[in-house]
Image (spheres, helix red, strand yellow):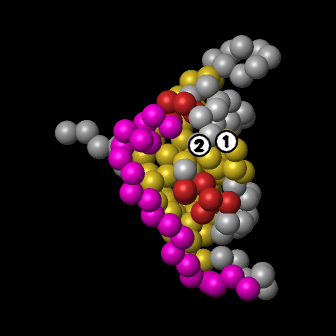
């Protein structure tokens, strides 16, 4: 049995950017950070943050565009590894990203902009084939360059 599914809750590093693939499909990209604390061998409290690259395709890209830096999200999706050669140096790079299938805004920062503290954002039901074809089209895209 094989299963490629991931659930992550964390905070957006920046407002998602929406672009369009050559086919016209909208895609939004963002980074999500989730942190945890632990005590190291000497008893000192340590904090570690994992950063995840997110890709929102189709209607979910419109939803993602409504999110802001610091929003607390719950993401469900699958992990994809892809290689690309950025313009210029031509060296192949490998990225791992989460292809978002559903997302929920857990809480927005209280910044006085009138947004509700708890909003269910979106869930999109599409076939895996649709996601795979959009992800395949995304393979030549150099986002994110690190």
| Residue furthest to the top | 90
On the question of residue 42 being in view, the answer is no
Q: Quadrant of the N terminus?
A: top left
Q: Are discs 1 and 2 less than 8 Å apart at CB?
A: yes
Q: Is residue 48 positioned above or below 111 on the image? A: above
> How packed is label 2: few (under 14 Cα within 10 Å), some, or many (20 or more)?
some
- At 36% from the left edge and 43% from the top edge, which residue is drawn? 128
Magenta part of the chain: 114-134
Pointer 1 residue: 20
Residue 128 belongs to magenta span: yes
Pointer 2 residue: 25
On the question of residue 2 being in view, the answer is yes
Instruction: Specify the quadrant of the image occupied by residue 88.
Output: top right
- Residue 129 at what x, y percent from top left? 37, 39
- Residue 141 at what x, y percent from top left? 65, 30
- At 69% from the left edge and 55% from the top edge, which residue is drawn? 16
């Amino acid at each position: 049995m094989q299963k490629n599914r991931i659930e992550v809750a964390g905070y957006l590093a920046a407002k998602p950017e929406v672009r369009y693939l050559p086919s016209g499909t909208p895609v939004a990209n963002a980074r999500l950070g989730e942190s945890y604390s632990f005590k190291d061998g000497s008893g000192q409290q340590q904090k570690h943050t994992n950063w995840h690259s997110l890709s929102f395709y189709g209607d979910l890209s419109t939803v993602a565009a409504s999110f802001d830096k610091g929003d607390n999200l719950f993401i469900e999706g699958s992990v994809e590894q892809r290689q690309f050669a950025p313009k210029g140096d031509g060296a192949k790079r490998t990225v791992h990203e989460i292809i978002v299938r559903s997302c929920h805004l857990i809480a927005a920062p209280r910044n006085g902009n009138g947004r509700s503290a708890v909003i269910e954002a979106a869930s999109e039901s599409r076939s895996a084939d649709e996601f795979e074809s959009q992800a395949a089209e995304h393979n030549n895209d150099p986002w994110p360059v690190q």
